[in-house]
Image (cartoon, rainbow, N blue to C red):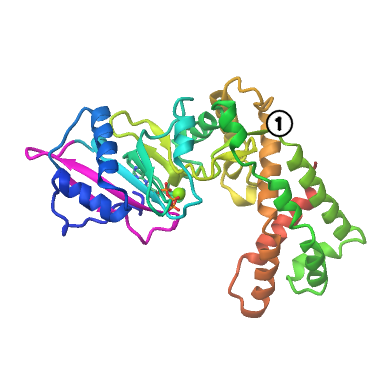
Amino acid sequence: MSARTAVPNTAIPALSREGLLDWLHTRTRLQRRHVDRILRRAEQMQGQTPDRYHPASLNPDRAGDQSDCFEVAPLESAATIPPRYRLFVKQLNDPRYHEAWHYLALTPAGAPVPVLYGWMSNADGHEVLFLEHLHMGFTDESLPPEDSRYEAFVRLIARFNALQPPTRYLAQLPLADLPGILEDAVPALRTLVAHGRRGGLGTDVRRLLTRGPHSAAHLAAQLRALVRRLRAMPVGLIHGDLFPRHVGVRADTGEWLVIDMLYTQRGPRLFDLAPFLGAPEDATPLLADRRRELARAYLDSLGPAPNAPRDVGELLAEAKALWLGWEMRCLRRWILSALEEGSNGVYRDSRRWLLQRLVQLAEWRP
Ligand SMILES: Nc1ncnc2c1ncn2[C@@H]1O[C@H](COP(=O)(O)OP(=O)(O)OP(=O)(O)O)[C@@H](O)[C@H]1O
Ligand SMILES: [Mg+2]
């Protein structure tokens, strides 16, 4: 189970419709009549008009701080109404965040996402979304590559990436500038070489950097080649945060759906897949055969998308480059952690990680 479940609040009794409107008005600062209109629409779509409701706030201690969330479970005097009639209310914490427009464009395009019953911005400009309530069964750790359901997850990523929403929507999406982000890390190589040659990043890194007169120059050339590789990657629709914690299950059909559309944008077409199939052997338990099998499943579910990778080989090479490029953006932070590891031993794995990434970069074939 996800740790992000609603806090059972026995202090809140079941509320009447009027009571629920007051409760939601207090928490979201939406006008009661707007909440009432959205609730009516949800009930119309669900074919249920409950007589009592049980609202609860989602645990405010959960990791994210981009939204406050509430669950509303309808109750009937006779029995509890099945979970599919619950509502999930998500209030974004910053007026610059917008999520409803993604649902509006992606739902008609057949996206595997929960139903958006309605939305409205409050007086502070914070968007409040009223969504179909899903069962959130996964954490990022609870779905490892050896799990038999991992393939379903990979196929879900493909279904999302294959969507073809209206061009007008696509044209307004931000473009993830990963090449630019990686380019910003290039000057950190000079720092790396200066500290590394003196041994400040550990003996293994020093050995790598002093292996030959061209080793530092080779790393710099490789990093620049990686930037060029990222820049040349075909661009597609990406979710931007498609990890197992953002997969929910529809109550009555068991269908897997994707939530949290805040980072949906255009970007390198395999961005969502790269964390899973692009990680090198030292960073994932995936074996080569399984990796190829999952790559085939991804291509199969992607279907004849206009810029689908040609084959498994092209897909895996691109995912690998993307994974490495996305990781290397952290070079500056790794150097700092590796330097500190020498002085206080707190970050015990940072030198090993830095070394492994540098070796991977040095051996990468553009
Ligand atoms: N439709 C839904 N049904 C049930 N639970 C949901 C739904 N949407 C979101 N949640 C729960 O709320 C949590 C936060 O939602 P979401 O990821 O959309 O917001 P967020 O602001 O990005 O939060 P975080 O940063 O914690 O991921 C999710 O991890 C999930 O547990
Ligand atoms: Mg989230």
The outermost residue toward the bottom is 343
Q: Name the residue at 77% across, 63% down.
A: 188
Please give the residue where the numbered disc 1 appears in the rendered image: 314
Q: Name the residue at 82% across, 70% down.
A: 194
Q: Tell me: 209 left or right of 289.
A: right
Q: Tell me: 22 left or right of 1.
A: left
Q: Decide if ligand 2 comes within 8 Å of the CB at mark 1.
A: no
Q: Which contiguous range is marked in magenta?
A: 53-81
Q: Name the residue at 66% across, 53% down.
A: 327
Disc 1 is placed on an element classified as helix
* 39 in the magenta segment: no
Q: Tell me: 288 left or right of 11.
A: right
Along the line of sight, the residue nearer the viewer: 318 or 281: 318
Along the line of sight, the residue nearer the viewer: 294 or 192: 192
Going by the numbered disc 1, the residue's amino acid type is: Glu
Q: x, y (%) of residue 245?
A: 43, 47
Q: x, y (%) of residue 5?
A: 31, 52
Q: Is residue 263 above or below residue 191?
A: above
Along the line of sight, the residue nearer the viewer: 134 or 71: 71
The outermost residue toward the top is 304
Q: x, y (%) of residue 231?
A: 75, 41
The outermost residue toward the right is 213
